[in-house]
Image (cartoon, rainbow, N blue to C red):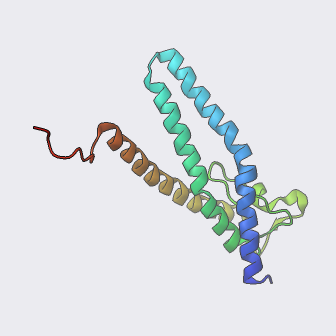
Amino acid sequence: MQSYLQTIVEGVQSTFGYFLFGSFLLVPILALVVLIIWIAGLLFGRRQWNRLAIDSVTFLVLVFIVGAIPNFLFDLLLRSRWYYTVDPLIAFLPFFPSIELAVDSVCGGRLINGITPIQFYLEWFFAAVATWSTAAVAYRRLTRNRRAVQLGAGADFGPPIC
């Protein structure tokens, strides 16, 4: 069994892999979302589609950033208990469930201790719900602050000039 420090170091390495290699998976997702919104904007001819595209990209990037925490926890708590992998790059990605990302059976990884793929996907589901929920709350706070600044709410302009 690994030492606790070695497990944490591997979790940090997996988080580094999450940002490095997960971003390669994020870019096509963002491009697809922007393309769909752009086509809808051309078809319906509204200017709000640009704002929607920017907000959608912002939200998805926020989901990706928040997903680093479940990736670290997924790796820290489940690797060597639920699955064995030789090549740990990404343990969790919030956009789609994949045993292959975490286990990497091509390099000799496998589920262990009687864990079934259904249990693995269920754990992914709970981590994904937490990720998307946290990102939604953070996004609401971010956009609320942005809208408040745009409207001048909370701005102190000092006493009136007579």
Left or right, 125 with reference to 92? left
Answer whether residue 115 is visible to the viewer in this image.
no
Residue depicted at x 46% and y 30%: 51
At horizontal 30% and vertical 37% (from top left) the residue drawn is: 151
> Is residue 150 in sight in this rendering?
yes
- Quadrant where the image shows the C terminus: top left
Which image quarter: residue 131? bottom right
Q: Position of residue 41 (x, y in %)?
A: 51, 20
Residue ID at (71%, 67%): 12
Vertically, is 72 above or below 136?
Answer: below
Say whether residue 102 is left or right of residue 158: right
> Left or right: where does residue 101 sit relative to residue 30?
right
Q: Position of residue 46 (x, y in %)?
A: 44, 19
The quadrant of the image that shows the N terminus is bottom right
**Among the 4 quarters of the image, the one containing residue 71:** bottom right
Residue farthest right in this picture: 107
Label tally: 0
Give residue 33's position: percent from left, percent from top: 59, 33
Q: With 137 as the anchor, is 77 left or right in this view?
A: right
